[in-house]
Image (cartoon, helix red, strand yellow):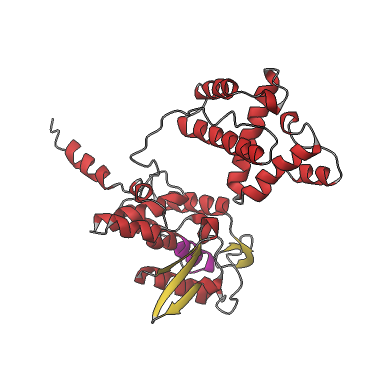
């Protein structure tokens, strides 16, 4: 995408599929879609890949111009994808194509959107697939961490933050030291969620202890603008000033879970799902969980509710043979 921007600035077209770059004006409109219209880098990457794959398919079928793309072509492409991909992935591909053509219609590049009338595959989800820790597993995992070093305290605080605030890992790794603050004699955390939304939550007393111990031992309390969760300096168990990445967190969780003997295949999102499930199991309300998780819809929050898993297990044990 960067190459395409530079090329357009020089009055040439490079770095884009031929379908979306018949001339500089069209190419500029396409690049604007991925830069000005889509701000989330992960969404931008996924949509760019989807657009590139569709352009490659069109080239294979001798569809050489945007004006030549018809609803039947998009429908045929989606039918092909359904044989190769799961329904959610196909729906993402269609959404990317539909939004890109909407943008091109607004820019008067094409008269109509050929993807607007195409229906994607049905996909109804009533239960999330994110692995959830049991209370016992969560206790074992958190208590197994060696907290005699800043790295151990960091890992415990990071996992505790995701459990007790239902925070996304993307919001956690962007936190600064100043995002942990005291208000009304209670420690609060400030999360910078997707879409530029700021979300503030009071800390559970366990999380308050985890954060205080980590910040004090790491000696970062005066570095207000510095990142809260930082990478380790090699094998020294000391911290740098660089932030951890989502990949770093995933590897850390996998390593800690293996060391603790936790066999559930958990990831970053498992702590969010675990926190929501236990909150609801202990009498919490779904609408409050939605607010705490910063979800737009209670239906999304409900996907993290895994209380019925335990009910099913209890019923299975009634089969006495």
168, above or below 149, in the image:
above
300 vs 181, left or right, is left
Question: Foreground residue, 150 or 82?
Answer: 82
Query: Residue at coordinates 40% horizontally, 32% vertically from top-left?
Result: 123
Image quarter hosting the C terminus: top left
Q: Is residue 87 above or below residue 37?
A: above
Quarter holding the N terminus is: top right
Magenta highlight range = 148-158
- Residue with the most extreme bottom position: 185
Whether residue 169 is visible? yes
Q: Is residue 231 magenta?
A: no
Residue 157 forms part of the magenta stretch: yes
Left or right for 217, reference 285: right
Q: Residue at x 59, y 50 (%)?
A: 40
Where residue 119 sits: x, y (%)? 48, 28
Estimate the x, y position of residue 98 in percent, counting from the top left: 57, 35
Judge by depth and name the residue closer to the eye, 317 or 290: 290
| Quarter residue 17 falls in | top right
Q: Residue furthest top?
A: 61
Residue 274 place in picture, x, y as percent: 35, 53
Residue 228, above or below 140: below
**Left or right of 56, for residue 75:** left
Of residues 139 and 45, the one nearer the viewer is: 45
Residue at image point 61% right, 71% down: 226
Assign the magenta stretch its main secondary structure: helix
Q: Position of residue 285 (x, y in %)?
A: 27, 58
Q: Is residue 138 visible?
A: no
């Amino acid at each position: 995408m960067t190459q395409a921007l530079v090329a357009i600035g020089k009055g040439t077209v490079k770095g884009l599929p031929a379908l979306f770059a018949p001339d500089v004006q069209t190419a500029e409109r396409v690049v604007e879609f991925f830069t000005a219209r889509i701000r989330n880098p992960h969404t931008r990457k996924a949509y760019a890949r989807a657009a590139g794959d569709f352009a490659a398919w069109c080239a294979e079928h001798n569809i050489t111009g945007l004006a030549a793309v018809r609803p039947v072509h998009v429908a045929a492409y989606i039918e092909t994808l359904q044989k190769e991909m799961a329904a959610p992935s196909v729906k993402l591909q269609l959404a990317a194509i539909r939004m890109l053509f909407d943008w091109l219609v607004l820019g008067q590049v094409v008269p109509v959107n050929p993807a607007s009338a195409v229906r994607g595959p049905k996909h109804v989800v009533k239960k999330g697939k994110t692995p959830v820790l049991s209370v016992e597993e969560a206790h074992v995992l958190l208590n197994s961490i060696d907290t005699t070093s800043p790295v151990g305290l960091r890992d415990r605080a990071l996992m505790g933050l995701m459990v007790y605030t239902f925070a996304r890992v993307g919001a956690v790794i962007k936190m600064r030291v100043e995002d942990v603050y005291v208000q009304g004699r209670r420690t609060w955390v400030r999360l910078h969620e997707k879409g530029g939304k700021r979300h503030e939550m009071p800390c559970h007393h366990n999380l308050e202890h985890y954060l205080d111990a980590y910040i004090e031992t790491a000696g970062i309390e005066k570095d207000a603008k510095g990142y809260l969760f930082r990478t380790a300096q090699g094998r020294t168990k000391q911290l740098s000033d660089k932030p951890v990445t989502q990949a770093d967190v995933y590897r850390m969780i996998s390593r800690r879970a293996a060391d603790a003997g936790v066999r559930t295949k958990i990831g970053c999102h498992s702590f969010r799902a675990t926190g929501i499930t236990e909150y609801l199991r202990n009498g919490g309300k779904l609408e409050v969980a939605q607010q705490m998780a910063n979800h737009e819809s209670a239906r999304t929050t409900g996907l993290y509710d895994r209380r019925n898993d335990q009910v099913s297990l209890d019923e299975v044990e009634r089969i006495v043979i």
